[in-house]
Amino acid sequence: MAKKLPKVSIIERRLKNPFGSPSEAIKLKEGDWATRWVSETLRSGRVYQVQNLGWDFVTPDEIVGQPVDLGCQAVDNRLVRGDAANREVLMKMPRADFDQIQRAKADANLRNLGSGKKLKEDAANRATQHFGTDEAGEAIYNSDLDVRDSRVAYELEDK
């Protein structure tokens, strides 16, 4: 006998996620992978850039089901979606590597959190670089500019 699933109304389901359901991760047949769509048209060389950051192409034989199930098609042994003016390619990275990178990003952000002096110095240095003159950086550094940051936690999904 099949397990009877509880009835959940559409309204109950929508109230749990009033802005819509979060996107589902694309699972591959083997291994534990992080996947993401990368725009080929956002800027020239973007796919090459993310390859150098550790991402690799997902091939059609790695997915569960057919490319059309994901709203994409197989082109040159890659999974792509969109038209030529707005094309994205599906890429993957080992989940353990992805998680380690995310932790390193979070740690770096936390180290810099609350350092208004550092943020002010960074703003002054960037102004100097952008305008090509020390005057811009000095104006920011010597100003009464008060830079503050804070950390807020948001629950993104029901678990």
Image (tube, grey):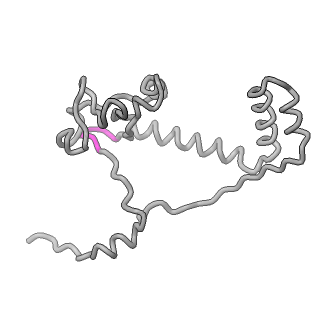
Q: Is residue 1 left or right of residue 9?
A: left
Q: Residue at x 83, y 50 (%)?
A: 146
Q: Residue furthest front?
A: 85
Q: Quadrant of residue 103?
A: top right
Q: Residue at x 40, y 34 (%)?
A: 38
**Span colored in magenta:** 27-32
- Above or below 139: residue 26: below
Q: Residue at 35% x, 33% y: name it.
A: 87
Q: Quadrant of the N terminus?
A: bottom left
Which image quarter is the C terminus in? bottom left
Q: Is residue 91 visible?
A: no
Task: Please state which of residues 48 and 96 is positioned toward the viewer in this rendering.
Answer: 48
Q: Position of residue 14 (x, y in %)?
A: 36, 70
In the rendered image, the vertical position of residue 96 relative to residue 154, given as above or below: above
As drawn, 81 above or below 22: above
Taking the magenta stretch, the answer to whether it contains residue 29 is: yes
- Please give the count of numbered marks on the rendered protein: 0
